[in-house]
């Protein structure tokens, strides 16, 4: 049952910011994660600030440099079916199409997908875990078959977003508005590591709003893709996922950005794999080496060691596919 709360619906970003500056409040976009968290008692909210009446936060527009400007309230479904995204930014369109179910893609927003709360069953359950202000991560010695193999110091969640690694691979930037000024943060730097603060998921301050995501114009020769492996064929989060954005010069790799989902508490950059493939022609030996580099340094827990082989095989298959 949902708890009682005040519900405000401003019509401009400035009105919304004024409310956030005036009182403790929680932003309501699509609500597909927020309402579930409130119903399950994951956190409380005295006031919800709905952004649904702010038209400027909706839709996909072309930027002056030829890139994309995606309003924070743009639905995941709109991104998944965008011809522009499918043509120039395959990894983003593919990632969006893999999110949840058709119903949730129609309701959920891109900002919500980036800012969603962890899906860890200890965090979502009745456990006073570290992320909720407690003194331990129960996953470390508990049921951890879906948890992280990288970056898990203190808290061992995996970031649940499919679109975040795709946007990070494309070098996208978040535009953030606050009461005094606006700022830009790369999607790659938008999420907060547990080592920095185990009780925060993003760099957003309580009085700030993510207003849009800007994706730069695709470089000549860009090829990108996203693939997700999950327990069920639909409506499930990634056991392992790979977002590739590789710029080719003929058959040679000029540059590469590779991010993993289902691997770490934040979208995880596979820098070692990038270093292996840049300047090569992606022959079989190079792909094997890059796949091995992807999982170098992995620290699986008691029940998720299978992820190491899964990521290695997934990287190999995706690199083989993208060189075609």
Image (cartoon, rainbow, N blue to C red):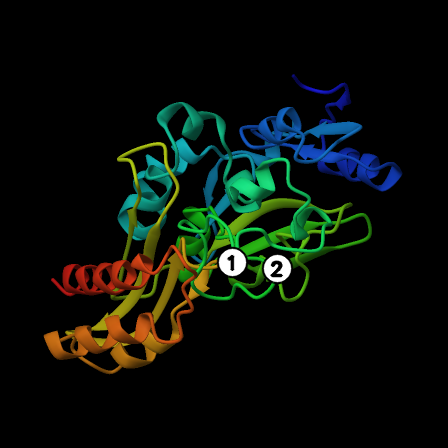
Location of residue 298 (image quadrant): bottom left
* Relative side of 272 to 150, left or right: left
Relative side of 275 to 190, left or right:
left
| Mark seen at residue 192 | 2
Residue at 57% across, 43% down: 122
x, y percentage for residue 321?
A: 15, 59
For this orientation, the residue located farthest to the right is 22
Residue 174 to residue 11: above or below: below
The reply to whether callout 2 and callout 1 are in contact (CB within 8 Å) is yes
Give 175 or 282, whichever is nearer the viewer.
Answer: 282
Q: Which mark is residue 228?
A: none
Image x and y of residue 299, in percent: 42, 69
User: Can residue 116 be seen?
Assistant: no
Secondary structure of residue under mark 2: loop
Q: Nearer the viewer, residue 240 or 54?
A: 240
Where residue 119 sits: x, y (%)? Answer: 51, 42
Instruction: Say which label, 2 or 1, has the lower sequence index.
Output: 2
What residue does disc 1 label?
Answer: 266
Residue at figure coordinates x 33%, y 65% from the top left: 219
Location of residue 237 in the rendering, given as x and y in whole percent from the top left corner: 39, 41
* Mark 1 surroundings within 10 Å by alpha-carbon count, few (fewer than 14), some (14 through 19), many (20 or more): many
């Amino acid at each position: 049952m949902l708890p009682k709360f005040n519900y405000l619906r401003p019509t401009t970003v400035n009105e919304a910011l004024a409310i956030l500056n005036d009182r403790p409040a929680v932003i309501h976009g699509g609500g597909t994660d927020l309402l579930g968290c409130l119903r399950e008692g994951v956190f409380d909210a005295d006031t919800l600030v709905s952004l649904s009446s702010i038209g400027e936060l909706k839709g996909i527009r072309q930027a002056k440099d030829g890139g994309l400007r995606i309003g924070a309230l743009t639905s995941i479904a709109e991104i998944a079916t965008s011809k522009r995204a499918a043509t120039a930014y395959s990894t983003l369109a593919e990632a969006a199409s893999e999110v949840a179910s058709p119903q949730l893609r129609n309701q959920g927003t891109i900002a919500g997908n980036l800012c969603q709360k962890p899906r860890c069953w200890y965090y979502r359950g009745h456990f006073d875990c570290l992320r909720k202000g407690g003194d331990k991560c129960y996953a470390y010695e508990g049921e951890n078959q879906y948890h992280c193999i990288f970056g898990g110091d203190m808290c061992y969640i995996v970031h649940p977003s499919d679109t975040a690694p795709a946007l990070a691979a494309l070098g996208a930037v978040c535009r953030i508005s606050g009461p005094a000024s606006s700022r830009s943060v790369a999607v790659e730097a938008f999420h907060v590591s547990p080592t920095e603060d185990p009780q925060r998921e993003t760099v957003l301050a309580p009085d700030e709003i993510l207003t849009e995501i800007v994706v730069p114009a695709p470089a000549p020769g860009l090829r990108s893709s996203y693939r997700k492996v999950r327990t069920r064929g639909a409506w499930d989060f990634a056991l392992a996922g790979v977002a590739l954005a590789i710029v080719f010069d003929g058959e040679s790799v000029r540059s590469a950005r590779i991010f993993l989902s289902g691997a770490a508490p934040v979208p995880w950059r596979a820098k070692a794999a990038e270093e292996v493939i840049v300047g090569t022609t992606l022959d079989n030996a190079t792909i094997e080496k890059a796949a091995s580099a992807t999982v170098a340094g992995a620290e699986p827990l008691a029940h998720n060691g299978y992820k190491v082989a899964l990521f290695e095989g997934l990287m190999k298959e995706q690199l083989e596919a993208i060189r075609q």
